[in-house]
Image (spheres, rainbow, N blue to C red):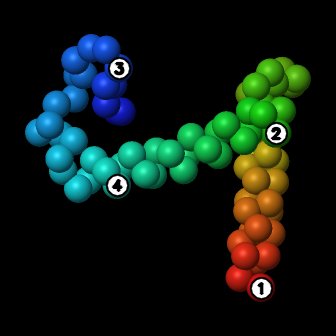
Amino acid sequence: MAQNKKNRSSAIDGRTTRQAGYAHSQRERKRVEEIFGWMKTVGLMRKVRHRGHERVAWMFTWVAATYNLMRIRNLIGATA
């Protein structure tokens, strides 16, 4: 859960946010949210065109594999 600091008191206080694990979980959360954001904008997952659990699951797997290929390409380009 993220801490809300905008114009009101947060449900998460300093006892939680001062822990090293909280900062780590927030970094991991950002990475996961970036992936799902990419899937929605680029991977056409915002409004799924298919009906049925099997087809939507297949499309999700396809988009996730495409994201991984893009990520591998960028990682290889960064190290070269």
Q: Residue furthest left?
A: 15
Q: Earlier in the sequence, mark 1 or mark 4?
A: 4
Tell me if 25 is positioned left or right of 77 in this view. Answer: left
Residue at mark 3 to residue at mark 1: CA–CA distance: 43 Å
Bin the neighbour count of mark 2 within 10 Å (Cα to Cα): few under 14, some 14-19, many 20 and up.
some
Residue that label 4 marks? 24
Q: Which mark is residue 6?
A: 3
- The image quarter in which residue 5 lies: top left
The residue at which mark 2 appears reads as 43
Q: Amino acid at mark 3?
A: Lys
Query: In the rendered image, which quarter is residue 74 located in?
Result: bottom right
Which quadrant would the N terminus be assigned to in this image? top left
* Residue type indicated by callout 2: Gly
Amino acid type, residue under disc 1 in the picture: Ala
10 Å crowding of disc 1: few (<14), some (14-19), many (20+): few
Which residue: 76% across, 53% down? Answer: 67
Give the vertical position of 41 relative to 32 (above or below): above
Q: Counting other residues with Cα less than 10 Å from the Cα at mark 3, is it few (<14), some (14-19), or many (20 or more)? A: few
Question: Quick one: label 2 or label 4, which is nearer the N terminus?
Answer: 4
State which tag comes first along the sequence, 3 or 1: 3
**Three-letter amino acid code at disc 4?**
His
Disc 4 to disc 3, how far (Cα)?
22 Å
Which residue position is annotated with label 1?
A: 80
Q: Are marks 2 and 1 in contact (CB under 8 Å)?
A: no
Query: Among all residues in the image, which is located at the extreme right?
Result: 49
Nearer mark to the viewer, of 2 and 4: 4
Residue 78 or residue 72, whichever sits in front: 78
| Mark 2 or 1, closer to the camera | 1
Calculate the distance from the C-alpha at mark 1 to the C-alpha at mark 4: 29 Å
